[in-house]
Image: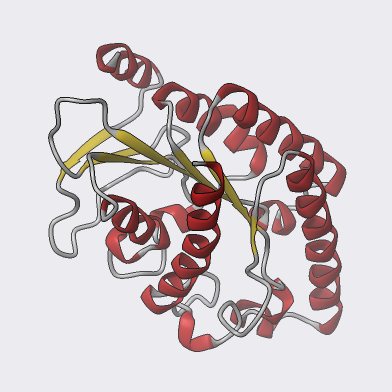
């Protein structure tokens, strides 16, 4: 199976990085921002089939803004899963700038190929900023969640969007721009809730509290979280994912 997977990834012209035991120190794997980036991390060598976690999304999956990949929310979730015991592999399928349509085209086939037991998805921010129509986003999300539900048995959780007009990067925008941003995020979040409910996908709430608005939780660009911010995001994801795994097991 692995031979077929590697050939398939090479056919994309992509890069496969295998990290035995995770990243060393503060090293960040050099993953090009292309629609074929994959990271594999094996926590232990075992005779039986390892359990797999696939992270879908954009630059957040790559811990952009943090000091190392291990400081991102994805690796923090991976560490929590690995602490449950057994052999786990991590597939980080997202890359910077990815929109939902990119996830459908590139990340979804990769996720299906590795047959993950756990899938996390955080998307929509780039679609909001790049002017994607809410109706188009909703149709793509419906297709994505329907496929993941019908073609995998994975524990699947999805995050909504923070109120982006309140985030540090928006401070330099005009009142009109912030108002437009507020309305678009509100519309996208309503669609996320509706489509997620249709497929019984639990939603991680990133709107509440000050986590996603406090400048202390952000890197200098005011867009990407720092290590502290990602720690908070991981905690919210884990609360929902742990409940999802408990409910379905």
Q: How many numbered circles does the render carry?
A: 0
Q: Residue at x 55, y 59 (%)?
A: 240
How is the structure coloured here?
secondary structure
Q: Position of residue 182 (x, y in %)?
A: 81, 72
Quadrant (top left/top right/bottom left/bottom right) for the N terminus: top left
Q: Position of residue 183 (x, y in %)?
A: 86, 67
Answer above or below: position of 37 versus 245: above
Horizontal arrangement in the rendering, residue 92 relative to residue 89 (left or right): right
Q: Position of residue 166 (x, y in %)?
A: 70, 81
Q: Position of residue 83 (x, y in %)?
A: 26, 55
Front position in the image: 99 or 76: 76
Front position in the image: 166 or 144: 144
Horizontal arrangement in the rendering, residue 80 relative to residue 220 (left or right): left
Q: Residue at x 47, y 88 (%)?
A: 216
Q: Residue at x 76, y 35 (%)?
A: 142
The quadrant holding residue 214 is bottom right
Answer above or below: position of 147 versus 141: above
The quadrant holding residue 52 is top left
Q: Residue at x 63, y 30 (%)?
A: 149
């Amino acid at each position: 199976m692995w031979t077929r997977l590697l050939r398939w990834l090479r056919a994309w012209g992509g890069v496969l990085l295998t990290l035995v035991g995770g990243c060393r120190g503060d090293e960040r794997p050099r993953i090009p921002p292309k629609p074929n980036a994959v990271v594999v991390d094996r926590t232990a060598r075992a005779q039986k089939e390892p359990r797999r976690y696939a992270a879908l999304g954009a630059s957040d999956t790559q811990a952009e803004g943090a000091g190392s990949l291990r400081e991102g929310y994805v690796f923090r979730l991976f560490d929590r899963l690995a602490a449950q015991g057994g052999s786990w592999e991590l597939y980080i399928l997202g890359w910077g700038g990815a929109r939902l349509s990119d996830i459908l085209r590139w990340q979804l086939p990769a996720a299906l190929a590795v047959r993950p037991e756990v899938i996390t998805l955080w998307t929509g921010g780039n679609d909001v900023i790049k002017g994607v129509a809410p109706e188009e986003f909703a149709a793509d999300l419906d297709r994505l969640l329907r496929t993941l539900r019908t073609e995998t048995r994975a524990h699947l959780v999805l995050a909504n969007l923070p109120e982006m007009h309140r985030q540090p990067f928006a401070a330099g925008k005009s009142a009109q721009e912030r108002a437009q941003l507020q309305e678009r995020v509100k519309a996208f979040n309503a669609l996320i809730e509706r489509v997620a409910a249709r497929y019984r996908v639990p939603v991680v709430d990133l709107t509440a509290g000050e986590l996603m608005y406090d400048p202390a939780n952000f890197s200098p660009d005011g867009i990407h979280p720092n290590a502290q911010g990602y720690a908070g995001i991981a905690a919210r994801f884990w609360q929902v994912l742990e409940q999802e795994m408990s409910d379905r097991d």
